[in-house]
Image (cartoon, grey):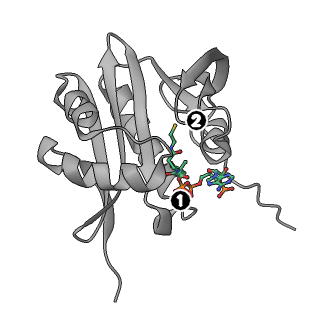
């Protein structure tokens, strides 16, 4: 049996389920209070990735003037490396563009190779470094950004002949 999957808006009532994924996927997860505060921001943008009844990923951020600040993006461990992180990122960038954002900014741990590869694939560039931005463990953050709208992802080149 196949389960339908899709990206939908997240409500504030679903933040407890976000916390469960957060705790499984980050070395120093946000707290429920952090997530509730963020999700109740008037200008927040939050999407969930659902497989049937199960929330298996999310992306959350805030809009300030024309900038979308991507605060957190995660896909639950058993669902990683199946294209879902890309799907969430593409959808949230499209949504931010519809809401008139002209750029997306975010921070990422220096050692987070999976996320760095993903953002690189989506055309993010390094703007700078924020020293010792993260705790547990203490680590620098790369500051990344990209203009909006999102460019289409490069398609594989098909050679005929
Ligand atoms: C980062 C994360 C969201 C990626 O989600 P995902 O569903 O696995 O990503 P996708 O399957 O769409 O992969 C897209 C690209 O990301 C990169 N990537 C994903 N996982 C990777 C890994 N373990 N190692 C290296 N690159 C990886 C690859 O470039 C991949 O493209 P490819 O499959 O063509 O090589 C996921 O690893 C995650 O939730 N990590 C923990 C939370 C986190 O660190 N979030 C980022 C906060 S800034």
At mark 2, the secondary structure is loop
Q: In terms of image quadrants, where is residue 29? A: top left
**Rendered position, 83 above or below 74:** below
Q: Which mark is residue 137?
A: 2
Q: Position of residue 41 (x, y in %)?
A: 19, 24
At mark 1, the secondary structure is loop
Inter-mark Cα distance, 2 to 1: 28 Å
Residue under the point 51% across and 45% down: 27
Q: Position of residue 97 (x, y in %)?
A: 38, 27
In this view, the residue in front, 48 or 71, is 71
Q: Is mark 1 within 8 Å of ligand 1?
A: yes
For the C terminus, the image quarter is: bottom right
- Label 1 neighbourhood size at 10 Å, few (<14), some (14-19), many (20+)? few
Judging by the rendered image, the residue that carries numbered circle 1 is 83
Q: In terms of image quadrants, where is residue 59? A: top left
Q: In terms of image quadrants, where is residue 143? A: top right
């Amino acid at each position: 049996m196949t389960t339908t999957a899709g990206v939908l808006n997240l409500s504030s009532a679903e933040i407890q389920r976000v916390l469960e994924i957060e705790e499984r996927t980050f070395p120093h997860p946000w707290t429920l209070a952090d997530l509730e505060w963020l999700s109740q921001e008037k200008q927040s943008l939050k999407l969930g990735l659902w497989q049937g009844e199960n929330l298996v990923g999310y992306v959350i951020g805030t809009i300030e003037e024309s900038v979308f600040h991507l605060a957190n993006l995660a896909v639950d461990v058993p669902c990683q490396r199946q294209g879902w992180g890309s799907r969430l990122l593409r959808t949230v960038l499209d949504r931010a563009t519809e809401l008139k954002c002209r750029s997306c900014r975010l921070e990422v741990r220096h050692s987070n190779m999976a996320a760095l590869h993903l953002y690189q694939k989506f055309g993010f560039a390094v703007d700078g470094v924020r020293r010792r931005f993260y705790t547990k463990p203490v680590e620098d953050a790369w500051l990344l950004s990209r203009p909006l709208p999102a460019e289409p992802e490069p398609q594989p080149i098909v050679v005929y002949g």
